[in-house]
Amino acid sequence: MSVPVSVSASLCPLVTPATREPAEHLRHTPTALREPSTLAYSYAIPGEPHAASVARGNVYNALRAHGLTELEAPALQAAGELVACAAMFEPGKILYLTLGWKDEGVRIVLWDPHTNHADPRYTAQCTARRNKMLYLLACVVHECGGSWGIDKPAPMREGTRVWVNLPRAGAAAFGRARR
C-alpha cells in the first residue's frame, strides 16, 4: 500500500499548507520594494574589462526596481568608473560593489583587494594614480553636489574602499541636464 506524499509540504512553519502563501505579516508588497529606503544590494564583480558594463547593468536594474530612474545617469557613471579603476589596480581579482540608500541619496561603495605598500612612497603613488583615474567620477559627483573618497588600507587590513554619495536632488538634476 502506498501512502500519498504531499508535494505542497513546506518545512517553514509560516507557510500554511492550505494557501501555500507566507503568513500575512511576511508578505512582500510591490510598493515596499519600490521604496528607496529598501535599496541595498551587493555584487561580487570580476576585475576584468567587461566588469564595468556588468556593474552598470546591475545598478540600472536595482535603481529601476526601486523607482529611482532619475538617478540613473550619475549612478551608472559612478559605478562604471569605480569598477574600471579597481580592475586596473587588481586585474583578475574579485571586486565588491555595494549600492544602497543613505541620507536621501544613493551610496555606492567599491572594495578592491589592493593593499597598502610597505614603502609609503608606493602607497602615495597608487593613491595619486587612483585619484587621476577617477577624475571624471569626481566631476560627476561635484555636479551632483555629492561626495566621494578613498579609504586607504589600514595597517593589518587588506584592500581599498572607494565610496560615492549622490544626493537625490542633485543626481536627479544632473540626469535631467544630460537628456
Image: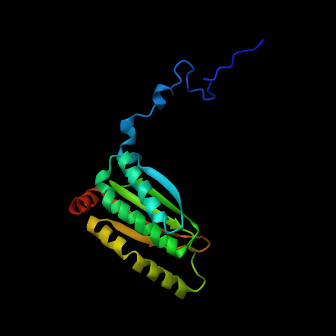
- Can you give x and y, in whole percent of width and height, for residue 81 in the image? 41, 69
Left or right position of 150 against 159: left
Seen at 36% across and 60% down, the residue is 75
Residue furthest bottom as drawn: 121
Front-most of residues 8 and 96: 8
Quadrant position of residue 10: top right
Left or right of 22 on screen, residue 30: left
Q: How many marks?
A: 0
Name the residue located 36 percent from the left edge and 43 percent from the top edge. Answer: 35
Protein image colouring: rainbow
The x, y position of residue 64, in whole percent, is 36, 48
For the C terminus, give its image quadrant.
bottom left
Vertical relation: 114 (above or below) 5: below
**Extreme residue in the front direction:** 50
Image x and y of residue 55, in percent: 45, 60
Who's the residue at 59% across and 74% down the image? 155
Q: Which residue lies most toward the top here?
A: 1
157 or 36: which is nearer to us? 36
Residue 8 figure quarter = top right
Image x and y of residue 65, in percent:
38, 45
Q: What residue sits 78% from the left and 11% below the top?
A: 1
